[in-house]
């Protein structure tokens, strides 16, 4: 179901004590905010999940993982399964973040398998897509993003797709301080929504939450979130500063 969402991706940052401090400096003020029309998802290092899920409900946020295995269970040392996430009350999971695609060689087949396992375990995938700078400069960005979406989530039926959130994250904007312009963001989000309308129907497309990610911060969030097809943000760096993250949450 379409809604306004701000998700914070903490990546591989913060020791246990640091995470505890940051969590409480976000959660306490969050409790007092009127979030009737928007949702906050925190994606900390999964090792700390319980500290987050324990207080999530009374503090107005949900908990997401940053990754899961594409295997169900078994001899896969170091991996964490979708069923394990579910057993820890995790409700969301990032899939296909550009850092996973780039540094861990995750391909579309693997990502589609992860999406399926998450849905089987009633966890909502936050499916990330986005082009690298060379693709944009060569004017291939629509083809690249279209292919990622086609291969990652278009095998789902409409009912399954309703549990997916899409995050458009141009790779050249992630962690670089170079945000997509409002025109670039709106154009790509409208393109993605249109792809969904063509493959499924307009109602399915209108129900999809499509988040923007890539150097979104307390200064530019309002302008980005006001765009017709932008339903919020996936926030990296700025989610590690309580004041900035809280300002972003209030940018709808
Ligand atoms: C991200 O990694 O998902 C991200 C959007 O990072 P940043 O906000 O730091 O660009």
Image: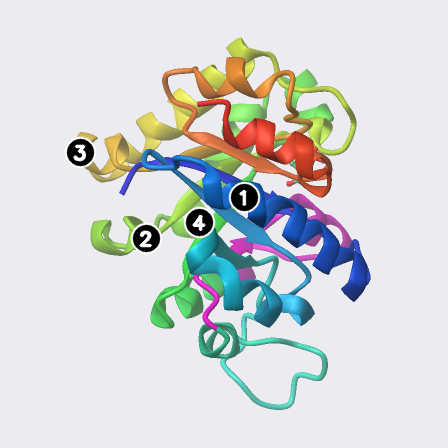
The quadrant where ligand 1 appears is top right
> Upstream in the sequence, badge 4 or badge 2?
4
Contact between marks 4 and 1 (CB within 8 A): the answer is no
Q: Quadrant of the C terminus?
A: top left
> Upstream in the sequence, badge 3 or badge 1?
1
In the image, is the residue at mark 1 within 8 Å of ligand 1 by its beta carbon? yes
Residue wearing tag 4: 60
Q: Is residue 94 above or below residue 78?
A: above
> Upstream in the sequence, badge 1 or badge 2?
1
Q: Quadrant of the N terminus?
A: top left
Residue wearing tag 2: 163
Magenta residues, start to end? 89-111
* Disc number placed over residue 128 in the picture, else none: 1
Q: In the displayed orientation, state which residue is furthest to the top.
A: 183
Q: Secondary structure at mark 3?
A: helix
For discs 4 and 3, the disc positioned in front in the rendered view: 4
Residue drawn at point x = 50 percent, y = 22 percent: 251
The reply, left or right, for residue 222 in relation to residue 121 is right
Report if residue 219 lies within the magenta region: no
Measured in 3D between alpha carbons, the distance from the residue under mark 4 to the one under mark 2, in whole angstroms, is 20 Å
Contact between marks 4 and 2 (CB within 8 A): the answer is no
Q: Is residue 126 above or below residue 225?
A: below
Marks counted in the figure total 4
Measured in 3D between alpha carbons, the distance from the residue under mark 3 to the one under mark 1, in whole angstroms, is 22 Å
Give the quadrant of residue 7: top right
Front position in the image: 1 or 202: 1
Residue drawn at point x = 27 percent, y = 56 percent: 160
Task: Give the x, y percent position of residue 218.
Answer: 64, 23
* Disc number placed over residue 203 in the picture, else none: 3
Local packing at callout 2 (Cα closer than 10 Å; few below 14, some 14-19, many 20+) is: some
Local packing at callout 1 (Cα closer than 10 Å; few below 14, some 14-19, many 20+) is: many
Contact between marks 4 and 3 (CB within 8 A): the answer is no
């Amino acid at each position: 179901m379409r809604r306004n969402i701000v998700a914070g991706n903490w990546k591989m940052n913060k020791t246990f004590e640091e995470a505890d401090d940051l969590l409480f400096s976000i959660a306490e003020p969050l409790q007092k905010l009127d979030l009737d029309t928007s949702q906050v998802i925190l994606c900390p290092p999964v090792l700390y999940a319980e500290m987050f899920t324990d207080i999530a409900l009374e503090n107005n946020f949900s908990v997401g993982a940053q990754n899961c295995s594409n295997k169900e269970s078994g001899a896969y040392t170091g991996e964490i399964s979708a069923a394990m996430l579910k057993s820890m009350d995790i409700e969301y999971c990032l899939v296909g973040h550009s850092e996973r695609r780039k540094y861990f060689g995750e391909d579309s087949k693997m990502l589609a398998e992860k999406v399926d396992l998450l849905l089987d375990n009633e966890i909502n995938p936050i499916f990330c897509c986005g082009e690298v700078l060379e693709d944009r400069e060569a004017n291939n960005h629509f083809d690249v993003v279209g292919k990622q979406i086609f291969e990652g989530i278009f095998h789902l039926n409409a009912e399954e797709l309703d549990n997916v959130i899409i995050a458009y994250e141009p790779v050249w904007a992630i962690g670089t301080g170079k945000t997509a312009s409002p025109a670039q963001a709106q154009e790509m989000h409208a393109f993605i929504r249109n792809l969904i309308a063509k493959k499924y129907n307009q109602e399915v497309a209108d129900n999809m939450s499509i988040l923007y990610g890539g150097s979104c911060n307390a200064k530019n969030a309002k302008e980005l979130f006001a765009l017709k097809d932008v339903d919020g943000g996936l926030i990296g760096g700025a989610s590690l500063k309580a004041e900035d993250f809280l300002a972003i949450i209030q940018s709808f």
